Amino acid sequence: MLHSPPGDEQQLVLPVGFDEIVRVIDRYVADRRAGLPPLSRSRGRRLPALLLAREPDGDPAAGTAEPDPGLTALVLAYGQRLVSSAGNLTTRHLASLAPHAVIDDVRLIRGGAREDVVGGPHVLLLEDVARQLRTSMPEGAGALRLPEFDTCLAVLRADLPPGDAEEERRALRVMLCDRYTQRFQPAAETAQLGEAMGGKWGAVLQLLTVLPGWLRRLWYGIRLDRRHPWAGRMLGQTGRSFLNAAAGLRAAHQHTLAQNAAESRHPEAASLAARDEAVVRQVLLTALIRDLARAARPRLWSRLRPRRRWAFVLLLPTVGGEGSACRKFLDTYAAVARDNGSSPLLVLGAATDELPSYAAGLPRQSVQGGADAHRAGRAAAALFSAAVAGRAADAVHVLPLPRTPDDGTAAERLASHRAVHFRRPRRLDWARPVAAATAAAVLCAGGVALSRELVGLFFDEHRTPVGHPTSSCRQVPTGEVVGLTDGIDGCDLAHGLYAPDLRKLVRTLGRQNAQVNTDRPYRTLVFFAPLSVGSESKRTVPTGFQMLRGALLAQKQVNDRHLKSQVPVRLLVANAGEYFRYGSRGGLNTTNGSDVDVTQMIIDRADKDHIAAVIGLAQSRPESQQAAIELGTRGITVLGTGVSGQRMVEGNSPVSYFQLSPPNARIAKVMAAFARHSPRLRTLAEPASGHSGPAAVVVFDPRDEYFSADLAHRFDAAYRSTGPVHLVPYGEMEDGRPTSDVADTVCTLVHRTNGFVLYAGRSGVMEDLFHSMQGDRECRARQGRVAVLAESPAPGLTMHPRLMPQRYGGLTLFYSQFSRPAPGGPFARSFREAFHLSAENDAAVGYDAANILSEAMNAIFTTDRFFSPSALVTFLQDPGVREYVGESGVITLDSGHNYPPNKEIHIREITPEGTQVTDLTCGVLADGARSVTTWGPGGRFACPLDAVP
């Protein structure tokens, strides 16, 4: 059932940092065992119940949390995330993403609690929870069966004739046996056929019809006296008989009903009735939890097992006084949770009245440090991580939320930007049931030779040496080969202009992977980026090659260290195809109409190849973010390199995603500051009339919302107070407008305004525009060269700066980069020796990505030699990476920073002589690990700083 938040969602503003808490909860809703190794047992692991409250006024560490009725809306708003629209346009309906229930005090009062004399409100409460969980099962996940809960409910609701205790016990046995064997009754037609046949064969047919049901009844009657010892323990009884426990449960329930119906009650009797009511509720909830735990773990060969990784979610919008329904449920849950080792329930409530005494506060280390918008998110992540690892002791935890509202983030965003990703049914889900049935049939038939061949084939597939895995590559209609390779499996991913370069790098990859001893613990990193172009395209993306070279150098150096406690690193290369089209499928990726999904190829090999993380992506696109989301559902860390689109670190960004590059928000501010003050730029562009700065002609792709359009609009907002801004659309792909027309528009504007060009397009099409501008009459007629400031320059021009004056003498290129490796440093020397190229920004981020993940894995390896990919996610969230001095800058990553704050940025210029000079340097530098806050002659100009969270 869908419950809408009260009031207008547009007016409901989230507390600061609440998005981070929601992302943590989403992760464990989608996978209740997130962070655990695949084969780890789940006994003793219980998700904590989170009770939302408000931080006290003043110092959050100085007092206890306080209830707030306004938090009800946040809990109900989260419920919107658990449903989605499904079906076609004419039959659209609400589909559940995870089974969930909402305890509504008002509905329980109105919906029959007073009329249900047999059940009573305490029974109706849990019955309503079970009903909601049944009806909210995701499509394709099967029906939810609650045998123990339904049996206990049947005992409470049974209409038995009056009698002594022994008679009631016999009546209960008959009632339960009838109820159990009702679905096994023989068909009436079979009995009629036996009577019609008559004689000996008719009698045999009737016996065969009745015998199975009779045997089941006998077997179930024996089970009633030999099972469910937990119910007897909760009722203070000894032995294993469920019948005795059922009789005691029914007696406690009847006593509660009698006292509730009495007009006047003695205080002692009322106290006993309240105790009995609590015991009945605890027994029912225990039965429900036990059933849910079994439902969450179908049999190994069940087709439903891969589908049921989500948690069962219970929402308590109004945890008020002791008489409210939500409070009664939470009291019951806290009482029984300690005795249930494993529970798939995820309880989220809002404290609207006095906090329960049993609710534990935040860990001490989470409270220290004063006001911090990310403290609650880190605390939630730590609580869940400890709970699934079996370390959580308290069942209910209070999570104080900051009183500061988020800046314009409405609650409707929780529903519109869903990140609860559930696993859809697949045809392969039948693989295990069919394989099990086939194997049993072969063994029973005695086909020794055939069974040996099938088993041999099966184990050969799974015993393939890690150095020679099954090929994971596919040719797509563009002519490209996408997928992943380890360098020795026969997959040739090279295609397009730079195919020889990629083949050479893959050969290096194969040699380095062959030196890793796979008989000992190791982990694999995947470099994932567009590494080829289509047959009809003349563009390429050598940026990814430099990052791959940096990662290969880091792999070699890491494996050559031979430290005391070290994880050897293998490296796979994954090609997503041009524009990252085949890197993901569905969701945000609307361009991939095929069945090829390179991210799924990576996930399919995650266990076999011990994949711990993915690096690269290299491009800010919906397709690359969808890949990060798909990998995040499996708990695989993604560390982006060269990615700058703001949406990559906001909105749909999963908690497992990090990046080493600054986002567009910071880049646009730095570029605007450079355009506003740079003396070098002022020699080529004059201030516009009535403005303090020159006009900016912004070239951007309006369809590229993740990178180009986002950067253009952010630069416009930062620069418009300095000089006029003229926006000129220029598509990365063919859009019907010749590049020469775009160049003519740009050159006309530059000539008329004496301004400069802000190039916000993609690097792959920069030289197309430069070629047309170089031959344009307006650009050539202008006095002096045309200044172009670019965020994503063509890699060929920055790697070989002498080409700029040779090819485009009428232009001067200024460009940003995120690091400046020391030309004479160890990294630059090693890179030049290995690849005979100079090291620059892209090589440095690839190098740092592999080194950072290697050090994180080494830290985890000291305590857990068999850690899962999710352990790496948890480590990067907390404690994270603190001021790591890499070749691409000083890097800090944790749950509050999915990209380095105040990342260093340089703006460099290619001079008419073909040399490179640096005109601006801002941020925290790797060179001397110092923070640069000013730039320009004499440090006259202030550097833009990231907002402090």
Image (cartoon, rainbow, N blue to C red):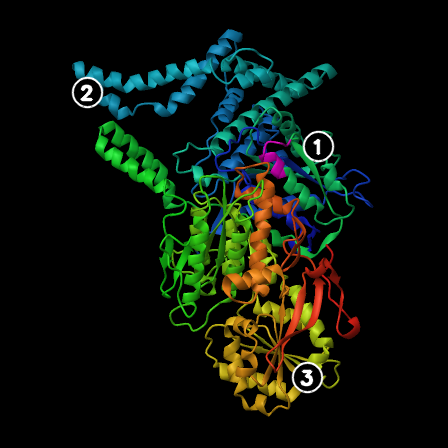
- The residue wearing badge 2 is 196
Q: Residue 605, image x and y in percent?
A: 43, 47
Which one is earlier in the sequence, the residue at label 1 or at label 2? 2
Q: Residue at x 52, y 79 (%)?
A: 769
- The residue wearing badge 1 is 359
Residue range highlighted in magenta: 384-392
Q: Label 1: how many residues lie within 10 Å, few (<14), some (14-19) or many (20+)? A: some
User: Is label 1 in a helix, a strand or a loop?
Assistant: loop
Disc 1 residue type (three-letter): Ala
- In this view, the residue in front, 199 or 521, is 521
Please, is residue 938 above or below residue 598 in the view? below
Q: Reply yes or no: does residue 389 show up in magenta.
A: yes
The disc placed on residue 568 is none
Residue 343 in view: yes
Residue 1 in view: no
Disc 2 residue type (three-letter): Ala
Q: Residue 272, image x and y in percent?
A: 68, 16
From the image, which quarter does the N terminus lie in?
A: top right
Q: Residue 663, image x and y in percent?
A: 63, 62
Q: Residue at x 61, y 38 (%)?
A: 385
Label 3 – label 2 distance at C-alpha: 106 Å
Q: Residue at x 60, y 70 (%)?
A: 791
Which one is earlier in the sequence, the residue at label 1 or at label 3? 1
Label 1 – label 2 distance at C-alpha: 69 Å
Which one is earlier in the sequence, the residue at label 3 or at label 2? 2
Q: Residue 9, image x and y in percent?
A: 65, 53
Q: Nearer the viewer, mark 1 or mark 2?
A: 1
Q: Reply yes or no: does residue 167 show up in magenta.
A: no
CB under 8 Å between callouts 1 and 3?
A: no
How many numbered discs, if any?
A: 3
- The residue wearing badge 3 is 685
